[in-house]
Amino acid sequence: MYSHFLEEFLLNCLHRDLQAGIKDLSKEERLWEVQRILTALKRKLREAKRQECETKIAQEIASLSKEDVSKEEMNENEEEVINILLAQEELLAMEQYLRRQIASEKEEIERLRAEIAEIQSRQQQHGRSETEEYSSESESESEDEEELQLILEDLQRQNEELEVKNNHLNQAIHDEREAIIELRVQLRLLQMQRLKRENQTQEDAEELGENATSAQQHRDVVSDSRVAQEQPKSVKETLKPSPSKDRKETSI
């Protein structure tokens, strides 16, 4: 950088001497040498700026690519974890509901069993007292026994039907709860995905603005480089000695 300023200083001094009309071949040669060195330094400076800009853009692209990959992996893992947690939450709720249903059905079964046991006990007591009674009463007792037997059979049949109905009901409840769990999980995932899309849209808009700013800076650097490339040519044409002027000086 210091050599660049030194060369420009020497170049300006040589320009002043030539414009003052001082004829010196060594100074002219020195002028062309300084001009050549200055042009080379400017070319290196432009190349360094260009490489720095390209390196910066490449680093930004690589960083954005890594961020996109990490975000995608994180989103996939996050969705899987959320899906598992939601399913677990719904399964726990279904388990509590089924436990309450099972407890209620067990109470009903115990009630029916107690009622059957009571009827059987009454039937046994009736059988023991049967031998102590007169034969004239045997016919009516037989009718009571048959009636009790019919009641017992009816209760047993109701108990069996209730157990079958209970099994069907539990299976239907299980199927419905599984369908509800799946729908709730899908609904909550859709809500979260919509929220993520809104956030992603906002991030993309901000990123687009940053990329536009970076592209504008890159265009400015390229424009400055072109101007710097054209400037040495105009200076060189200005400093090139005029043949007519040399002839006049020679004739003098």
Image (cartoon, grey):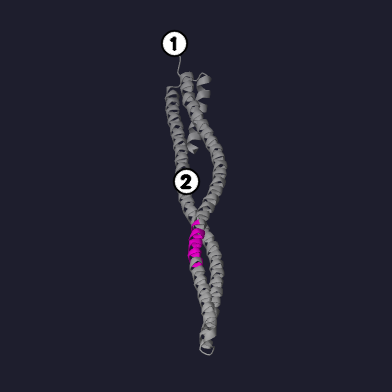
Q: Are marks 2 and 1 in contact (CB under 8 Å)?
A: no
Q: Which residues are magenta?
A: 162-175
Q: Say which residue label 1 marks.
A: 247
Circle 1: element type:
helix
Three-letter code, disc 1: Arg
Can residue 168 be seen by looking at this rendering?
Answer: yes
- 13 or 95: nearer the viewer: 95
Residue nearest the observer in this picture, 27 or 50:
50
Q: Horizontal and vertical percent for residue 216?
A: 53, 32
Q: Is residue 7 above or below residue 199?
A: above
Is residue 54 found left or right of 216 in the rendered image? left
Residue 25: give x, y in percent of width and height. 42, 22
Label 2: which secondary element:
helix
Question: Mark 2 against mark 1, which lies toward the viewer?
Answer: 2
Asked if the magenta segment contains residue 25, the reply would be: no
Q: Of 49 and 45, which appears nearest the observer?
A: 49
Residue 153 versus residue 212 in the image, above or below = below
Amino acid type of disc 2? Asp
> As displayed, is residue 241 above or below residue 202?
above
Q: Give the numbered dot on residue 20.
A: none
* Residue farthest toward the bottom in the current orientation of the protein: 132
Give the residue number, with chain letter if any, for mark 2: 68
Whether residue 10 appears in this view of the structure is: no
Local crowd at mark 1 within 10 Å, few (<14), some, or many (≥20)?
Answer: few
Across and down, in percent, residue 205 comes to 56, 39
| Residue found 45% across the figure and 47% down from its top | 69
Residue 109 in the image, given as x and y percentages of width and height: 53, 72
